[in-house]
Image (cartoon, rainbow, N blue to C red):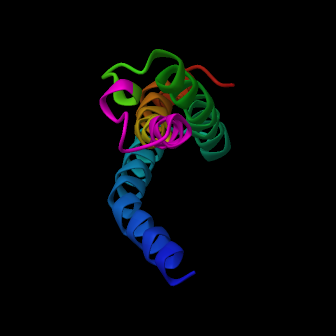
Amino acid sequence: MPFRLAVAWTGFRGGLPLGALVTGVGLLRAARGAGFSWRAWLWSIAAALAAALVVCPALMVALDPLGMREASLGVWSRGVATRYLACWGLHAGAYLGVIAGVFRGPRPGGAGRSP
């Protein structure tokens, strides 16, 4: 359990700057437009993040873009290599989802898209 807590703590510290960036972008958007909706903007980010956390790991496992399964033969079992690819996809998907949510979100003045 201490190792898992250490990994979780590392993830929290790694994600904190990205969370601060997303919140900062939201504050800037809120200040620019009276029609800004925090609820719509956060829903957009959450939806994009959820999609990325499903799509990216599935693509990574299905495509194995760098040939991890073959490269790790004799060192890792096929199942371990597949789990590694899924974790890698989750990691990349988390960043891609937040970025997509920030750029897809409602625009100042209510001219943006809402979910």
Q: Position of residue 8 (x, y in %)?
A: 49, 69
Q: Position of residue 43 (x, y in %)?
A: 66, 39
Q: Position of residue 50 (x, y in %)?
A: 63, 36
Image quadrant containing the N terminus: bottom right
Position above or below: 68 against 39: above
The stretch drawn in magenta includes residue 80: yes
> Residue drawn at (46%, 15%), measured in percent from left and top?
63
Is residue 35 in view from this perspective?
A: no
Q: Nearer the viewer, residue 61 or 20?
A: 61
Numbered-mark total: 0
The stretch drawn in magenta includes residue 21: no
> Residue drawn at (36%, 29%), measured in percent from left and top?
68
Q: Position of residue 33 (x, y in %)?
A: 47, 37
Magenta span of residues: 70-87
Q: Quadrant of residue 41?
A: top right
- Could you tell me what secondary structure mostly forms the magenta stretch? helix
> Residue drawn at (30%, 23%), measured in percent from left and top?
66
Q: Which residue of the protein is positioned furthest toward the top in this rendering? A: 63
Q: Nearer the viewer, residue 25 or 12?
A: 12
Image quadrant containing the C terminus: top right
Q: Which residue of the protein is positioned furthest toward the front in this rendering? A: 74
Q: Nearer the viewer, residue 25 or 100?
A: 100
Is residue 15 in view from this perspective?
A: yes
